[in-house]
Image: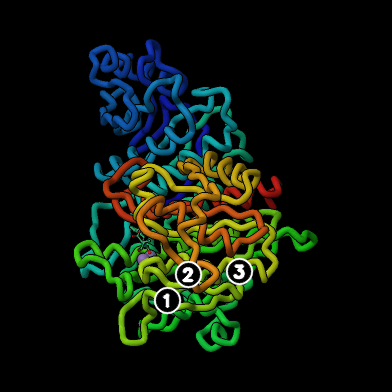
Amino acid sequence: MEWKVTGEALASLVTDCLLVVHTQGEEALQGCTREVDEALDHRISGLVTEGEITGKHGEVTLIHNWGKIPAKRLLVLGLGKGGELDLDKVKNGMAIAARKARAAGVKQLTVACSPTLNNRWNPADLVQAVVEGFELGVYRYRGYKEEQQEDGSLDTVWLAMPGVTDSAFAAGIERGRVFAAATNTARDLTHEPANKLTPSILAERALEIADRYGIEAEVLDEQKLNELGMDALLAVSRASAEAPRMIVLHYRGAPESKEILGWVGKGVTFDSGGIQVKPGRGMEEMKGDMAGAAAVLGAMQAIGALKPHCNVTAVIPTCENMINGNGYRPGDVISSFSGKTIEIQHTDAEGRLILADGLAYARRLGATSLVNVATLTGAVIVALGYAATGLMTNDEKWAEEVKAAARVAGEKMWELPMFEEYGEYLKSEVADLKNEGGAPAGSIQGGMFLKHFAEETPWVHLDIAGTAESKKESGIHPKGSTGVAVRTLAQLAMRFDGQVK
Ligand code: BES
Ligand code: MN
Ligand code: ZN
């Protein structure tokens, strides 16, 4: 999609489709919408009075120009109640409008929307919300069908936003495009079936991203993992015909600083459950058990493009959790890169095992703060449903920074407690800890396990098992992989050291 800016008066603007916004319960139309309404002899306000346009969030009404203006068609997008309006509502609304426009065969469109809609907004942030919403909303996974779906595509979007400076346009367009493209990279990777995205192919994709943005990269193969004693990752991988990898990327945007953000993503390219195999139906969803890895890679792509002033080391342990005679068993005691021993209680609690080595390795590489992202537990869906990512931490101050980044990014996260009582579940009679301890507090057990490997380093665990996939189309998310956590991580890097570039 190409993004352009126009300062032309809306009443004389030549465009295939003009998008204006309307908020609910508004007597008089505002800003750009009012300007267009006047040129249309108050047809829009007429439709509002008749109740045909309500302004309900996500309502999109296609209207005509009645021969009054050069714009061929108009879309009126409802943004909900004025008092509840925020940039997230703008972003989600724009995504819905973008899909509607595409479905109506619109190729070229102009968004007319003014920052005076809400005086608290920084104009660049509004531009970003519009661009991000469009680019996220029209995302489609291409898949492997012989015939691609061809219902046209939006190719050029013009922004008509009075009062926005050129530099605000430039900054907002860049950030919106980069954040969306990075999210869409993660969505693509997560959608890929496990036979098309094995651990070694995931490593190749990571190298491609690193190469494109001049990020330093290293991939540890099985032999190297053996030498280093990455026994937890190796144990999970053992029953698979595909060899595991540990992917490491270094973004060095602040070489003078010792601070290094460590991002660790769960890269299980397929999770059968191991010998404690999962039920058959629905197992295909476990091709997406590398959504955490995809989020980390997407975020690396974003910072590779935006070049914030900070250092990030990404660590992605990746393997399959399969079944054969070599597989690890319940009752086995394995070692790990950290030196801690683990009694296997459940072969389906594999994510925390590979993350144990990932977190310990990120610390070895000098990470001074950690965030790990993982589709870790079905239990997080019981706790929070599909609405929010579960957040756990060993450091409230660090958690506040991650939460603040998530708020800006518009990603809902909710903290679960890490009371020491929960540690009881993981006590083992034969090893330093076990990987699972029965039914209660399933997600917290996952967090408590990982905490042992973050040790003293400020750490946040994001359990995205409920948020990595969207069961239905909704706002910025088409049905399917959401690319969740990409924008939170990227935002975190941007605010870690306020400065960009
Ligand atoms: N990958 C799953 C978690 C998951 C569930 C992701 C649903 C996405 C959707 C994870 O490896 C797993 O199997 N967790 C077990 C943990 C249990 C054995 C302690 C689970 O949730 O049942
Ligand atoms: Mn599992
Ligand atoms: Zn898993």
Residue 132, compared with residue 88, is above or below; it is: below
Q: Are marks 1 and 2 in contact (CB under 8 Å)?
A: yes
Q: Quadrant of ligand 1?
A: bottom left
Type of amino acid at the residue the image marks with label 2: Leu
Where is mark 3, residue-wise?
Answer: 360
| Residue sitting at x 51%, y 61% | 449
Q: Quadrant of residue 19?
A: top left
Which of the two labelled residues, at mark 3 and mark 1, occupies the earlier sequence position? 1
Q: Are marks 3 and 1 in contact (CB under 8 Å)?
A: no
Where is mark 2, residue-wise?
Answer: 353
Query: Most extreme residue toward the right, as rendered?
Result: 256
In this view, the residue in front, 42 or 310, is 310
Residue 428 at x, y percent in the picture: 48, 67
Neighbourhood count class around disc 2 (C-alpha, 10 Å): few under 14, some 14–19, many 20 upward? many
Query: CA separation, marks 3 and 2?
Result: 11 Å
Residue 390 at x, y percent in the picture: 45, 48
Could you say which disc has been placed on residue 236 in the image? 1
In this view, the residue in front, 400 or 98, is 400
| Residue sitting at x 38%, y 71% | 269
- Coloring applied to the structure: rainbow
473 on left or right of 263? left
Q: Are marks 3 and 2 in contact (CB under 8 Å)?
A: no
Query: CA separation, marks 3 and 1?
Result: 16 Å
Query: CA separation, marks 1 and 2?
Result: 7 Å
